Amino acid sequence: MVDYLIVGLGLAGISFCEILEEEGRSFRVINDHSQQASMVAGGLYNPVILKRFTPVWKAHEQLELLPAFYSKLEKKLGVPLDHPLRILRRFASIEEQNAWFEASDKPVLSSLLSARIIKNTNNALHAPYGYGEVLGTGRVDTSLLVNAYEAYLVGKELLLPESFDQELLHISNSEVVYKELRAKNMVFATGYGLKQNPHFNYLPLNGTKGELLTIKAPDLKEVNVIKSSIFIIPLGEDIYRIGATYKWQDKTNEPTSAAREELETKLRTFLRCEYELIEHVAGIRPTVADRRPLVGQHPEHNRLYILNGFGSRGVMIAPFASGALYNFIEKGDPIPSEMDVLRFKKRYKNG
């Protein structure tokens, strides 16, 4: 018998595995690559909602955990994952500049927003009103992380590369049994795949489709992340990631021409150089109506747990939420009420 059986190996599953290894707990992982959100994510960690100049929920707590968490992963996996980058918010008007100054004066934001207006010096970008800088930001290479961590688990014979079959799961008050595996606890970290889970599909996971472009722009020469109506994220060697779209109806992982046109139209409003389109990808973000994660225990089955709903900020939320779930299971510490699935208990009772 193992201590934990985990279904899913995106940012949520990886983060929980890391805590289990650190604490000396035994586990196995089941994953089938059906969910692509972590693989195609922009991977930015940014503590500020740049549309409204407001802090991300629990931003300071999340940022406190982030550097050590990804540094440890880099050493374990032998790959570069954490790339500190400046994020510059492009201003569209004097009014936006003034709103930035007001926001940077607020105590909750003063350590996250620079009060200095940065003048644009890049001729390939149109930004007559300059930029505001977000502090403590960067990018995690999520695709490299997922691939490297999967290889790591395969090497330790901890991964079952297959689709999870709900019909083969047997639950009791003392354990869960799946095929020949027995575990004390089971954690579902399946992203949008939660919709097919009969035990947790009462939760209001909506799913938001995001599409990103990768371009090559030799004349852009930008080393900072630029946020306007979309992001430009430098990846090195004149390669940039452009994103992202937010669509609520289409739940497929297939890229669409409409999204490509939307992204390119927005890009051309402030990009003043030629570029070549290299790649176009899509994935479904696991989003929740109240924009908070889904973390906690099943209302009836005390051996089943959920770790989900990170939306577009999984890089930041994953270590924080995973730690909260582990401490709840092993130490009895309460999960922060804003992300505890107990907030949706009435939905379960109402069927």
Image (spheres, grey):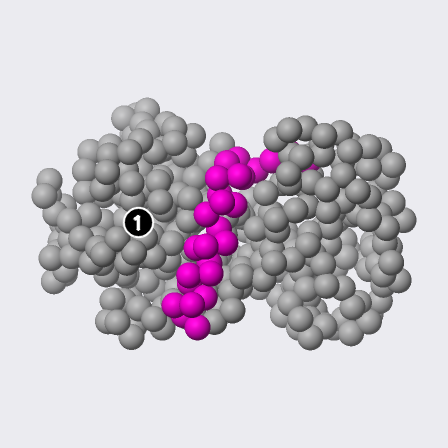
Q: Please, what is the three-letter code of the amino acid marked with disc 1?
A: Phe
Who's the residue at 51% across and 69% down the image? 80
Vertical arrangement, residue 60 with respect to residue 78, above or below: above
Q: 219 or 75, which lies in front?
A: 75
State the count of labels: 1
Percent x, y of residue 265: 77, 56
Secondary element type, mark 1? strand
> Looking at the image, which is closer to me, 123 or 59?
59
Residue span colored magenta:
53-78
Viewer can see residue 85: yes
Q: Is residue 91 above or below residue 54?
A: below
Magenta stretch, main secondary structure, is: helix
> Within the magenta stretch, is there residue 65?
yes
> Where in the figure is residue 227, as x and y percent of width and height?
72, 50
Residue lying at 29% horizontally and 44% vertically, measured from the top left: 326
The residue to which callout 1 is attached is: 188
In magenta stretch: residue 77: yes
Query: Within 10 angstroms of label 1, few (less than 14), some, or many (20 or more) residues?
Result: many
Q: Is residue 81 above or below residue 17?
A: below
In this rendering, would 21 be left or right of 254? left
Q: Quadrant of the N terminus?
A: bottom left
Residue 48 position by quadrant: top right
For residue 316, side relative to residue 162 (left or right): right
Describe residue 174's horizontal placement relative to residue 207 as left or right. left
- The residue at the point 73 percent across, 42 percent down is 114
Please tell me which residue lies in front, 321 or 85. Answer: 85
